[in-house]
Image: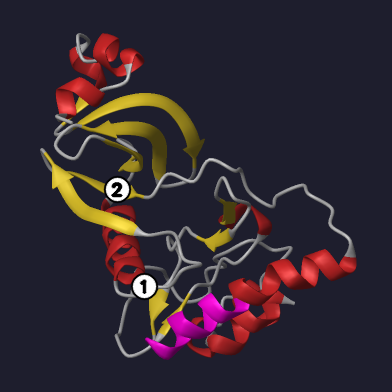
Amino acid sequence: VSPAASCPPEIEEAKRDPSRRFGKYVLGAEIGRGGMGIIYRAWQEDLARWVALKILRPEAGRTATGRFLQEGKLAARVTHPHLVPIYEVSQEKDVPYLAMALLEGGSLDGRTLPVREALETMVPVAMAVEEIHRHGIVHRDIKPANLLLDREGRVHLGDFGLAKALEEDIRLSASGTMLGTVSFAPPEQILGRRDDVGPRSDVYALG
């Protein structure tokens, strides 16, 4: 089936609006917004598929640009069944973007699970975190909102916007700056002790 033949009707309509085009992608509804980027449900024309397209916000500064590109490169470095797959890290007219798998089951944010179900849900997440640690990466923002579900209810860890590579000297935030989410971050991260943040910090967040 050709891409044109399989294009959803709502995308055919959106294609007539130049503001909805972003390179080879046609933007659908906004599905998320954070400090650095806006995430859209988008149609990738060349491969005829839906993706989650995260685009750097126009008002973001140079530091945010560096961290945004770092997010994509670190996330794309590791493949695991319970990590959100990254398809592409690139720029369109100097605007950085990430194309990711579109998971449409929502997140664990705000959900209350029985203890046994919660433990069973977190086992694959812990395995995914172990894999990113094996590749020398610390996530630094593990929380329910970043645990996304696919249509079958399988959980996937996403959003590597605050991740860092342990073997690299990445200086994208000033020493003493708190990064992450207070409710889930360990003491060393809350206190801005950047050099003390490591794999055990993610283990704290998992707990």
Residue extent of the magenta highlight: 126-135
Extreme right residue here? Answer: 114
The crowd level at tag 2 (other Cα within 10 Å; few <14, some 14-19, many 20+) is many
Q: Is residue 134 above or below residue 187?
A: below
Extreme left residue here? Answer: 93
Extreme front residue here? Answer: 1
- Magenta stretch prevailing secondary structure: helix
Q: Residue shown at 30%/67% (left/top)?
A: 76
Determine which residue is flagged by label 1: 79
Left or right for 115, reference 46:
right
Kindly identify the amino acid type of the residue bearing the numbered disc 1: Thr
Q: Mark 2 and 1 residues: CB-CB less than 8 Å, in contact?
A: no
- Viewer-nearest of labels 2 and 1? 1
Q: Is residue 110 above or below residue 117?
A: above
Q: Is residue 14 above or below residue 183?
A: above
Q: Residue shown at 49%/33% (left/top)?
A: 31
Left or right for 173, reference 141:
left
